[in-house]
Image (cartoon, grey):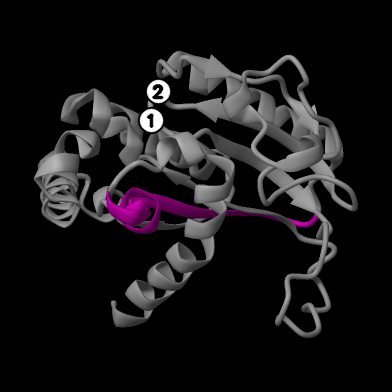
């Protein structure tokens, strides 16, 4: 448990500066505390190496249909890893020069779809990629099979949805979990760090309590004058 928590905290530190850069309109509480401490779902999808590009595309198309079925208000087009949907809303293109946020882009192969779970929530990217766009700094040599595996790692910060009420936040958070459940049902290996603890507990009450505790803490940090901005 301690190892998992340390990993989650490291990922939060790595991602908070990026969130503040690409979503400045979303960072309005007590020195960017929502960006630094907001509840996030980190996930990794892995599939067997023998899958063809056609099979991967079919899986992503099925995932896109499932996202619409469970009520996601916006589901992007299924795109090749180097493509961008120039007609998508602003929240779908979060990197400069129309590159994707952390995944896809030059040097990768595979298929992706971007899904918006609901108002206030970050979009999620689902799909599978082969090859790395670039070697992350400090990683040294990549594993020998890193360029052959079908894999995707991404995250979705769902906490912003609480601005539209706790019930709305829970619905958005659960939609991301439902997407991950669907990928697992399709045969992918799914690894998840859910800072709302819903992935392991399947308890809406626990999830609501986690975000309520976060709101209270951030409100105290913000002080009386900024308290309304954090809700």
> What segment carries the magenta color?
30-49
> Residue 108: which numbered mark, if any?
none
> Residue 4: percent from the left, percent from the top?
37, 74
Taking the image as drawn, is residue 99 in sight?
no
Visible residue check, residue 176: yes
The relative height of residue 5 versus residue 198 in the rendered view (above or below) is below
Tell me if 175 is positioned left or right of 109 in this view.
Answer: left
SS class, disc 2: loop
- Identify the residue shown where x is 38% and y is 58%: 36
CB contact under 8 Å: marks 2 and 1 = yes
What residue is disc 2 on? Answer: 118
Mark before the other along the chain sequence, 2 or 1: 2
Q: Residue furthest bottom?
A: 140
Mark 1: give few (<14), some (14-19) or many (20+) Cα within 10 Å: many
x, y percent for residue 66:
51, 22
At a point 32% along the width and 31% down the height, the residue shown is: 161
Asked which quadrant contains residue 18, the reply is bottom right
> From mark 2 to mark 1, how far is it between C-alphas?
9 Å
Q: Nearer the viewer, residue 72 or 182?
A: 72
Pointer 2: residues within 10 angstroms few (<14), some, or many (20+)?
many
Rendered residue at 71%/80% (across/down): 139
Depth-wise, is mark 2 or mark 1 nearer the camera?
2
Say which of 64 and 138 sits in front: 138
Residue located beneath label 1 in the image: 175
Which quadrant of the rendered structure holds the N terminus?
Answer: bottom left
Whether 90 is among the magenta residues is no
Residue 206 in the figure: left or right of residue 106: left
Which quadrant of the figure contains the C terminus? top left
Name the residue: 33% across, 49% down: 34
């Amino acid at each position: 448990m301690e190892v998992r928590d340390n990993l989650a905290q490291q990922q939060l530190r790595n991602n908070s500066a990026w969130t503040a850069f690409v979503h400045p309109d979303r960072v309005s509480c007590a020195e960017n505390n929502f960006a630094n401490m907001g509840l996030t779902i980190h996930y990794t999808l892995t599939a067997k190496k023998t899958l063809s590009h056609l099979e991967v595309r079919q899986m992503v198309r099925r995932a896109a249909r499932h996202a619409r079925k469970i009520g996601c208000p916006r589901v992007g087009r299924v795109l090749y890893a180097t493509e961008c949907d120039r007609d998508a809303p602003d929240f779908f293109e979060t990197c400069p020069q129309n590159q994707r946020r952390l995944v896809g882009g030059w040097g990768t192969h595979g298929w992706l779809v971007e899904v918006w779970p609901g108002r206030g929530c970050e979009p999620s990217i689902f799909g599978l990629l082969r090859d790395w766009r670039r070697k992350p700094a400090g990683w040294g040599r990549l594993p020998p099979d890193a360029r052959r595996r079908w894999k995707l790692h991404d995250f979705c910060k769902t906490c912003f949805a609480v601005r539209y009420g706790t019930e709305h936040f829970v619905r958005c958070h659960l939609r991301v979990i439902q997407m991950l459940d669907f990928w697992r049902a399709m045969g992918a290996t799914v690894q998840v760090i859910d800072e709302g603890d819903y992935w392991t507990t399947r308890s809406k009450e626990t999830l609501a309590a986690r975000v309520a505790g976060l709101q209270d803490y951030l409100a105290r940090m913000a002080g009386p004058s900024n308290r309304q901005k954090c809700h």
